[in-house]
Image: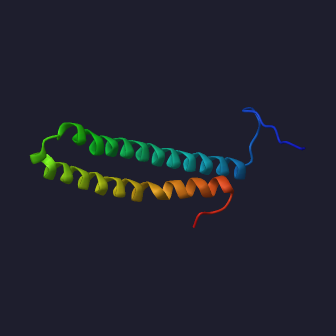
Amino acid sequence: SHVLRRSANDEYSLSLRVQLKENLWSIQKIEFGMYILIIGLTVNLIITFCPIFVLTEPQELETLQWWQWAANIFIAGTITLCVPMGTFAIGMHNGELPW
């Protein structure tokens, strides 16, 4: 099959340079979204599981329930903020616009 091979010393047309800049910009945004998602899920993991091991007394059950409530709200926010980045990444991978 015919494969176009390019090196760093090749001359790029204006349209290829613009496309390259757009691709780099898109990848940076997707990367940022994935970092936010990973950080958010890590924080949620801490909020969800640390209180279970710390709040073990029966009188601390209400506090544990509030921590779980906060963790659920936090994960809902994290996923809501990061899903557009994932949808965009899948659309780019499939070669179609996600919107």
Residue at the extreme bottom of the image, as rendered:
99
Front residue of 84/51: it is 51
Residue that appears at 85% across and 42% down: 3
Q: How many marks?
A: 0
Q: Relative to 34, is 95 above or below?
A: below
Residue that appears at 19% across and 53% down: 66
Quarter location, residue 98 = bottom right
Residue at the extreme left of the image, as rendered:
59
Is 84 on the left-hand or right-hand side of 52?
right
Residue that appears at 59% across and 45% down: 24
Give the colour scheme of this rendering: rainbow
Residue that appears at 44% across and 42% down: 35
- Residue 19: image x %, image y %? 66, 51
Is 49 on the left-hand or right-hand side of 15?
left
- Residue 30: image x %, image y %? 52, 49
Q: Relative to 53, is 40 above or below?
A: below
- Residue 12: image x %, image y %? 74, 43
Image quarter hosting the C terminus: bottom right
Is 9 on the left-hand or right-hand side of 80?
right
Front residue of 55/97: it is 55
- Residue 50: image x %, image y %? 25, 39
Image quarter hosting the N terminus: top right
Residue at the extreme right of the image, as rendered:
1
